[in-house]
Amino acid sequence: MESILVSGGAGYIGSHTVVALLEKGYKPVVLDSLVTGHRQSVAKDVPFFQGDIADSQLVRKIVEQEQISAVIHFAARSLVGESAEKPDLYFEENTAKTNRFVSTLLHCGVKRIIFSSTAATYGIPEDIPIPETAPTVPINPYGFSKLMIEQSFAWLEKAYGLEWIALRYFNAAGAVLDGSLGENHQPETHLIPLILKTALGQRKEIGIFGTDYSTPDGTCIRDYIHVLDLAMAHILALEALAKGTAKGVYNVGTGSGYSVKEVIETARRVTGRTIPAVESPRRPGDPDRLVAKVEKIESLLGWTPRFSSLEQIIESAWAWHRSHPKGYGE
Ligand SMILES: NC(=O)c1ccc[n+]([C@@H]2O[C@H](COP(=O)([O-])OP(=O)(O)OC[C@H]3O[C@@H](n4cnc5c(N)ncnc54)[C@H](O)[C@@H]3O)[C@@H](O)[C@H]2O)c1
Ligand SMILES: O=c1ccn([C@@H]2O[C@H](COP(=O)(O)OP(=O)(O)O[C@H]3O[C@H](CO)[C@H](O)[C@H](O)[C@H]3O)[C@@H](O)[C@H]2O)c(=O)[nH]1
């Protein structure tokens, strides 16, 4: 059984990927500081180390003790607004700490890494759908902190033979189908969980941030990708790295976009609840459309989304929110 170190494995996408790794016969080993993650989101029998990716001594110990052969690196801060207020925090937590982490891994002989990148590396795209070759001009420090990591990997590859894949996720959403794991961010800023908290009566209304964008109904369009499909992309990326058949940057999205109003309407249908919505001012830094071009990941990694219709995404997220109204309950 191959041991895979999962940094940030107690977070939203990380915890779903740990389950996918177990299902595919890997042995996941989690390293998480729990700064935003939840211990309860990782099964008790999965080896769990609470600590920081920048703690080289701890990383060395885990690699040796658990015989790690590859790493999936989720651990990061990812609040766009916070990154604009505290860019230095993001350059430290995301960029600098990843450099220390990868440097330690390389010195321990671990060369394979899958990295969580983001559509925020593109900034305001010129063309939709966005190909991986599009210009990368981030419009917030969060996107820039991730782009610097991608670029640093190219140099580490040249110098030390780092074998890497960066997955640029579009909008992760949804939950495992039995509702036992899901999204529990504190604070929550993402559209779908906020809509479902409104459906549960935990919020009075959902704000629609901007109705004057150049889209058919005036609200922003995003490419929502089910967290289980995202988890599968990591498994395929691991396999491709092991075989040496793929490397570099890949978008992970569906190639289809939905507007904020369409997402709210679908949630009303799926939940059968009213979900009051109010038109509000634009949120700074929101591009009008972000939709992935996905041919590269489909052809080179053999990946295809299976759970990412908007209905399936919202149904699974609704199952989680209804059964866990207080999230993981801390
Ligand atoms: N959620 C999305 O839509 C989305 C989109 C694009 C990219 N991403 C990226 O995917 C990754 C996972 O996102 P998520 O939504 O699951 O976030 P999350 O906050 O739920 O998970 C991040 C996890 O990393 C841990 N962590 C943070 N800093 C750490 C450190 N220095 N050392 C050890 N552990 C640390 C946290 O405790 C948490 O468990 C992040 O890198 C994020 O930037 C997410
Ligand atoms: O209460 C809300 C919350 C969000 N939105 C809108 O809903 C859309 C989606 O917003 P999210 O906050 O759910 O997601 P983002 O598109 O802002 O962010 C996502 O995509 C980014 C890439 O641009 C980063 O990768 C980030 O980590 C990831 O969560 C946006 O148009 C936003 O303005 C609302 O109208 N009301």
Image (cartoon, rainbow, N blue to C red):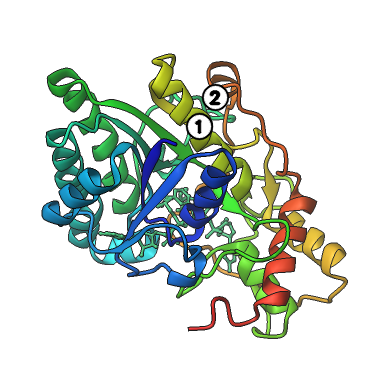
Splitting the image into 4 quarters, where does residue 212 fall?
bottom right
- Which residue is located at x 34 percent, y 42 percent? 138
Does residue 133 show up? no
- Which residue is located at x 29 percent, y 34 percent? 150
Front residue of 9/21: it is: 21
Residue 251 shows which numbered tag?
1
- Which residue is located at x 55 percent, y 63 percent? 190
Please rate how many residues cluster around mark 1, counting C-alpha atoms within 10 Å: few if below 14, some from 14 to 19, many from 20. many
Of circles 1 and 2, the one toward us is 2
Q: Looking at the image, tell me whether mark 1 or mark 2 is earlier in sequence order.
A: 1
Instruction: From this view, report whether residue 275 is shown above or below residue 211.
Output: below
Q: Check disc 1 and give the amino acid type.
A: Asn
Badge 1 marks a residue whose secondary structure is strand
In what quadrant does ligand 1 lie? bottom left
> What residue is disc 2 on?
297
Instruction: From this view, report whether residue 43 is shown above or below residue 30.
Output: below
Tell me, yes or no, whether the two marked residues, 1 and 2, touch with CB atoms within 8 Å.
yes
Instruction: From this view, report whether residue 27 is shown above or below residue 330.
Output: above
Q: In this view, does 329 lie to the left or right of 84?
A: right
Q: Where is residue 13 in the image (x, y as percent from the top left)?
A: 50, 53
- Which residue is located at x 50 percent, y 47 percent? 287
Alpha-carbon distance for marks 1 and 2? 7 Å
Q: In this view, does 22 lie to the left or right of 265?
A: left
Q: In this view, does 33 lie to the left or right of 202?
A: left
Instruction: From this view, report whether residue 266 is shown above or below residue 322.
Output: above
Q: Position of residue 182 (x, y in %)?
A: 60, 64
Q: Position of residue 244 (x, y in %)?
A: 39, 15
**Image quarter hosting the N terminus:** top left
